[in-house]
Image: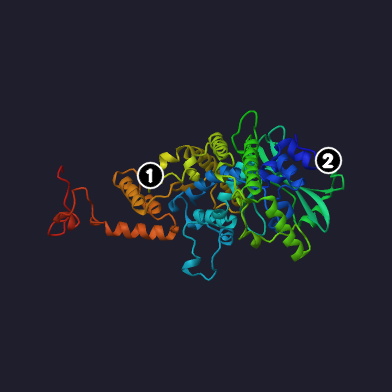
Amino acid sequence: MPLEWKKFDEKTVTELHGNVYYYRKLYEGRHSEIFERAKELIENGEIVDNIINGVPKTANVKTPYIVANICKLIPEVPAMLVSRSLGSIQTSFSPDDFANEEVNEETDDFIEGPGDGSESSRIIHAQQEVIRQIENNSKLAFEHWGNIVQQQVDGGLVGVPWLDDAGLRIEFKARDVYYPHEDGMGVDLVYRIEKDDKDYLQVYRERVERNASGDMDLHSSHMLFELNASNETKQLPDDETKLILGMNELEKVYKGRGRPFIIYWPNQKTFINPLGASCLRNQEGKQDEVNWTLTRNSITFERNGKPRIAVTTEIMQALQDKAMQRYGDDSRIDSRDLEVTTMDEKGNALQVIQIDVTKIGDIGWVKDLVKLMLMETQTSEKMIDFYSDIAGSQGAAQSGVAKFYDLFVSLLKAEQIQQEYIYFLQQLFEAALWIQHEQDSAIQIEEPEVMIKSMIPISRKELVDENNKAYTDGTQSLETTIRRNNPTASDDWVLEELARVEAEHSTDDNFSLERGRQTLQNFYGNRDENMNPIGDEEE
C-alpha cells in the first residue's frame, strides 16, 4: 500500500535508514561531535578542535584534537579503483539495426548540435547519440567517484531518470530520500524544500498498478505537503502544488511498464539489512581509540617533552631578586640570566631534565587498530601504502602483475562493487531510454554496455601488448583493441582510426576470393581473354 505522510522528521529517517547522519560525520572527520571522550576533553579545555572552535582559537592553544581518519580511506579506496575503471556508455545496437529514416523531429530536438544543415549537425547513429546526450546531461564522468563513496558510507544510493526543461538526465540521490512501499509495488522519494521562507515536504511517487485489461502500468505523481513547527504535514491542492513546483502536470502513466524507474543500489544487502549497511559499521569504536591514543600522546608530549632546568635554591633566589629589580615581579625570570651562573661548594650548577619522547605513546597499538579496521573492511594495507616506510624490494618499483597480488583483497571488493554499479547504471539508462521512447518511437529501449578499463595503472607498453595479443589470438575485435589502447579517444576518432587501419591492412582485391587470392583469372573478374565468364570446374 502507498505510504501516508502525516509527519516527517529525523526520527522518520532513522527508523528506516538507521543513523546515516552518524556515519557521514564519521567519514567527514567530524569526530569531536560524536565521540564522548573527545567532547569531554574539549569541555574541560585540555584540547581544542578547529571544527568546533575555529582556526583562530586553535592557533592559540598547544594541544589540538588529533584525528587520523581511517574511516575516510575505507570507502575511498574502492571508489578510486572502480571510478577509474569506467569508460563511456555504448549502445548494443549497430547503425544497421535500424534506419536513420526513422529519426524524426523529436530525435533531432533532443540531440544537441548546430541546426545549420552542416556535417556537424548530421545524425549518424541516433541510438548512440541519444545515449551520449543523456550521459552529457547527467555529467556522468563527474559522478562515479562520489556515487560510490556515498553508497559505501550511507549503505545505499538512489538513482532516478528525470525529464524537465534541463533535458533528460539521470539524477543520483542520497539514501535517506528513499521510502519503498510495504507491498513492494512502488516507492516514494521524499525531500524537504523551502519556498518563500516556508517549509514543504515534496513527495515524488512511482507505483505499479494493474489496469482494466489486466496489464501493469507505472503511475508517477508529485505531491506537496506544508510542514508546521511540529513537522506535521498538510497536503496542498493540485493547483497550488503546480504553482509552487512550477509544473504543468503532476501525474503521468507509462503503459506496459511493470517496475519503477527509480533504482536503489544497496551496499552489502542481507535479509537482516535489506536496504544495505554502511561500510563503516562497527568501526567507530576503533576509530575513537585511534584518535584518543594519538591525542593522549600529544598531551603527554606537550606536558613532558620540553626540556626543564633544575637549579639550586641559592640560584633560584638570585634569579627572583633580579626579576623583582628589573620587572617588579619575581616570577618574570629572564632566561638570559641562566647563561652564566655560579657553582655551589659541591660543584652543582644547572641541571637539564628532559624525558625521552621516543618512549612516549602507543604507536604500535595504533597500528594494530588500523590493521584491524582494514582487515574487517577488506582493504589491502598496500593500497594505502601502510608499509611505505619499509625499504628493500617492497619499496621498489613493481610491475602491474606484482601490484595486482599486493592489492588482491581490495581488488576483489572493488570488482564486486564495479559489477553492481554497472548493473545500476544499465538499469537507469534503460529507464531513461524508456522515457525518451515515450517521446520518440525511433529510440530503442535497451541496457547499454558500460566500457571498462583496468583498475590498476599500467604502463602504455603493457596496455598495448596486452590488447594486441588478444587481437592476434582472435579473442578481441579490432575495434575493441583500438578503443582499449586509446581509452580517452572519442567515438568518431575510434571509427576513423578503425577505417584507416583496415585500409592499410587490406591486401585483397574486390573480386571474388572463392578461387584463392590474386590470380590472373580473378584479377580479370573470372573472365578469359575474350572477356567471357569462366564457369566452375565441376561444370
Q: Tell me if residue 256 can be seen.
A: no
Which numbered disc, 2 or 1, marks the residue that appears first in the sequence? Answer: 2
Measured from the top left, where is residue 446 in percent x and y?
A: 53, 45
Task: Classify mark 2: residues with Cα within 10 Å, few (<14), some (14-19) or many (20+).
Answer: few
Tally of numbered tags? 2
Measured from the top left, where is residue 287 in percent x and y?
A: 63, 40
The CA span between labels 2 and 1 is 65 Å
Relative to 313, is 430 on the left or the right? left
> Is residue 147 depicted above or below 336 in this figure?
above
Secondary structure found at label 2: loop
Q: Name the residue carrying label 1.
A: 392
Task: Classify mark 1: residues with Cα within 10 Å, few (<14), some (14-19) or many (20+).
Answer: few
Relative to 447, is 228 on the left or the right? right
Q: Quadrant of residue 408?
A: top left
Q: Residue furthest left?
A: 529
**Mark 1 and mark 2 in contact (Cβ < 8 Å)?**
no
Measured from the top left, where is residue 337 in percent x and y?
A: 65, 61
The amino acid pointed to by label 2 is: Lys
> Which of labels 2 and 1 is toward the front?
1
Relative to 325, is 163 on the left or the right? left
